[in-house]
Structures are given as structure tokens and as C-alpha cells.
Image (spheres, helix red, strand yellow):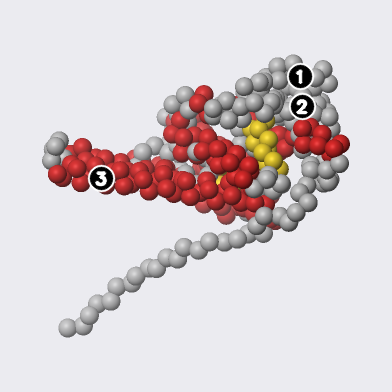
């Protein structure tokens, strides 16, 4: 009897390393695809809400052409049309699956990328999201434990498996924090961080889990003792320093700055129209310039938090907090281009 052979499709997962120019094109294309998805989805909802009209793929394709003719959306024509049309196909398939009962109603797409840290040279340290990656397994182990009878040996085994899963998450997070803090301390003489109110941030029930998963408090603790061990300078900027509201070019101070104004790559506008950019970039432009400055006190509480806050800023506006290190240059120390004292001996590896 002849054997019937079946066709097997094999997929391969690869990782690409684009050049800066290619990364810019990819980011623009992905941003345009996200915009088209949200615009078309809102248009679909409006059509159905006002006239109970169903929308076909051909109609969405014609609406995309209308979007490209909009002067405010002319940048949609600067990227390839294939990803945008594929976005329409994906949305059409999503609605087909929804009406067939196989999936839920399509939702708007948003930027979910949150970096763990951003350095002064623009390097972005990606958030490891250790808990989020293992959250599904943790939930499954906890459900299994809940089904076991209390006091039984099977429940004890299930509890041990849950504890083991939590231990793996904690160990993975600690490994990431140690590697990131060690690299920053090893490669830089001066490390400047912002005094974040983590306890206040975790009060937001929608962001508490994500913020706690970052481990910013532990990251600061590791930076403090590693900088002291290897002779580096760690500067903690007071949390009341208005770095996000202050223009790094003209010194203009915004009266109010909400989360919607500074989220992601949102930009603020200053009278000079040149200094206000993304929040991390604005922060570093204010901290690094060589000019007379004031710093937070070195007197710290039990958690390393500064007890003294500068509530009487200079009438000239907010000042960069690197003066204490530059003041050492007047005592005959060797300084670099930023005015930071340098060690005379060899660098630690």
C-alpha cells in the first residue's frame, strides 16, 4: 500500500540587526501601520454607530487612499504601501474572527514599549519584564495549588512549585539588575540618576505590577554600593527638580505638564522651539552642561533618600546638579571636559 506523504510547512525565527538608517525606516513604518489601524478602526465604529453599516475590506482600502490625501497625514505616502495594506487585511481578519465567535472585538493599538533606563548618549536599556514573561506559568501553578485539598501532601508539592517559580523570577530580575548596574559603574566615572517616588508610583493600580517588576529601588541600591566600591561618583537628582518642565536651551519653565504631554516620544513646545524634546533627552541636557549649579545634600535617610530638598531655587531658574564635583577642580584635581575630577590611577575593569 503506497504511503501518502503530507506537506509540512517549516517556519524559521531569526533576529535581525538593522543599521541606524534601517531602524529609522522600520520605526516609521511600524508607527504608520499603528496609525492606520487606529484610524480605520475608529472609522468602522463610527459607520456602524451612526448608520449600522458594515465595512468591507475594499471600503477600508479606499478609506486608506483618502487618508493619504489628507495634508496632515502626507507622511503615510513616505513608507511602503504593502505594510499598510497588510494592516487592513489583519484588521479584516480580526473582525471575521470576532463575528465567528473565535476572538474578541479588535482593540486600538498603543505604544507598549517602556524602557528600563535611558543614558545620556541615547542608549536605551530595555525593560526585561521578568514577571510578565512568566506570569502565565505562575497563574497556572497557582490554579493547580488552589484545587488541592488543604493540608494534603499534593498541596504542599504544588505550593513548592509556586514558590520555585517566584524564586526563578526574582533570581532572573536580580541577574538583570546586577549586570546593568555593573556595566554602568564600570564604563562611566559619573552616574546621575533621578530620585523617583517609587512608593507613590505603585499606588496606581494599573501600573503597580509593571513598576514593581522593574526593580528601580534595588537598581539604585546596587548603583550606590558599587559606585562607592569602585570609586565612581553617583549623583541623585532631587525629585522636585523640574527637569521635564524646563527647556534645556532657553530655560523656559512650563506651568503644567501632564502625563499625556510627556508620554513616550511626545514633545513639548518652548518659546525657543528648539530645546524641548523627549523627557530623557531634556533631562540630560540640563544635568550635563557646565555651569554654576547646586546639588542635593549628601545627608541621606535609611533608604538613601535625600532628607534636604532645594525648595529655594535660584532666581535664574533651575540649575544643573553637578557643582559639587566641579568644585573639587579648584583644589588642584585633574578634571575632564565636563569639569569632573578624574582618578590618577588606572581604571578598574
| Corner quadrant of residue 192 | top right
Query: Residue 338 at what x, y percent from top left?
Result: 81, 42
Taking the spot 79% from the left edge, 42% from the top edge, the residue there is 340
- Gap between marks 2 and 1 measured at Cα: 9 Å
Q: Crowdedness of circle 3 by 10 Å Cα count: few (<14), some, many (20+)?
A: some
Side of 9 where 124 appears, left or right: right
Element type at mark 1: loop
Q: Which of the marked residues, 2 or 3, is nearer the chain's N terminus?
A: 3
Please name the residue that numbered disc 1 is placed on: 313
Taking the spot 78% from the left edge, 51% from the top edge, the residue there is 344
Side of 133 where 231 appears, left or right: right
- What mark, if any, has residue 160 been given in the picture? 3
Side of 41 where 160 appears, left or right: left
Query: Residue 195 at what x, y percent from top left?
Result: 61, 30
- Gap between marks 2 and 3 measured at Cα: 52 Å
C-beta proximity under 8 Å, tags 2 and 1 = yes
Query: Viewer-proximal residue, 22 or 236?
Result: 236
Q: On the rendered image, what quadrant is the N terminus found in?
A: bottom left
Element type at mark 2: loop
Taking the spot 66% from the left edge, 21% from the top edge, the residue there is 308
Element type at mark 3: helix
Q: On the rendered image, what quadrant is the C terminus found in?
A: bottom right
Eyeballing the image, is 314 above or below 212? above
Q: Crowdedness of circle 1 by 10 Å Cα count: few (<14), some, many (20+)?
A: few
Query: Viewer-proximal residue, 29 or 193?
Result: 193
- What mark, if any, has residue 294 been given in the picture? 2
Which of discs 2 and 1 lies nearer the camera? The answer is 2
Amino acid at each position: 500500500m503506497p504511503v501518502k506523504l503530507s506537506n509540512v510547512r517549516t517556519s524559521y525565527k531569526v533576529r535581525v540587526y538593522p543599521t541606524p538608517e534601517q531602524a529609522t525606516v522600520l520605526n516609521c513604518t511600524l508607527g504608520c501601520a499603528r496609525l492606520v489601524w487606529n484610524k480605520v478602526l475608529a472609522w468602522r465604529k463610527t459607520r456602524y454607530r451612526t448608520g449600522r453599516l458594515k465595512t468591507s475590506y475594499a471600503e477600508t482600502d479606499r478609506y486608506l487612499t483618502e487618508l493619504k490625501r489628507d495634508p496632515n497625514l502626507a507622511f503615510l505616502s513616505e513608507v511602503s504601501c504593502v505594510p499598510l495594506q497588510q494592516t487592513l487585511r489583519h484588521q479584516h481578519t480580526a473582525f471575521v474572527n470576532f463575528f465567528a465567535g473565535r476572538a474578541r472585538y479588535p482593540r486600538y493599538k498603543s505604544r507598549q514599549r517602556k524602557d528600563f533606563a535611558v543614558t545620556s548618549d541615547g542608549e536605551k536599556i530595555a525593560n526585561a519584564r521578568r514577571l510578565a514573561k512568566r506570569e502565565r506559568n505562575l497563574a497556572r501553578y497557582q490554579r493547580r495549588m488552589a484545587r488541592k485539598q488543604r493540608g494534603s501532601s499534593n498541596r504542599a508539592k504544588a505550593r513548592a512549585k509556586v514558590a520555585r517559580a517566584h524564586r526563578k523570577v526574582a533570581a532572573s530580575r536580580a541577574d538583570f539588575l546586577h549586570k546593568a548596574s555593573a556595566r554602568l559603574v564600570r564604563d562611566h566615572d559619573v552616574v546621575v540618576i533621578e530620585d523617583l517616588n517609587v512608593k507613590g508610583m505603585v499606588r496606581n493600580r494599573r501600573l503597580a505590577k509593571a513598576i514593581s517588576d522593574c526593580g528601580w529601588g534595588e537598581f539604585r541600591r546596587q548603583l550606590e554600593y558599587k559606585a562607592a566600591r569602585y570609586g565612581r561618583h553617583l549623583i541623585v537628582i532631587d525629585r522636585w527638580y523640574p527637569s521635564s518642565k524646563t527647556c534645556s536651551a532657553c530655560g523656559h519653565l512650563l506651568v503644567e505638564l501632564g502625563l499625556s504631554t510627556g508620554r513616550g516620544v511626545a514633545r513639548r513646545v518652548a518659546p525657543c522651539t528648539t530645546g524641548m524634546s523627549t523627557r530623557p533627552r531634556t533631562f540630560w541636557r540640563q544635568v550635563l552642561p557646565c555651569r554654576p549649579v547646586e546639588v542635593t545634600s549628601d545627608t541621606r535617610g535609611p533608604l538613601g533618600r535625600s532628607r534636604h530638598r532645594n525648595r529655594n531655587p535660584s532666581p535664574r531658574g533651575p540649575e544643573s546638579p553637578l557643582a559639587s564635583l566641579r568644585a573639587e577642580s579648584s583644589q588642584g584635581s585633574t578634571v575632564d571636559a565636563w569639569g569632573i575630577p578624574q582618578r590618577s590611577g588606572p581604571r578598574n575593569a
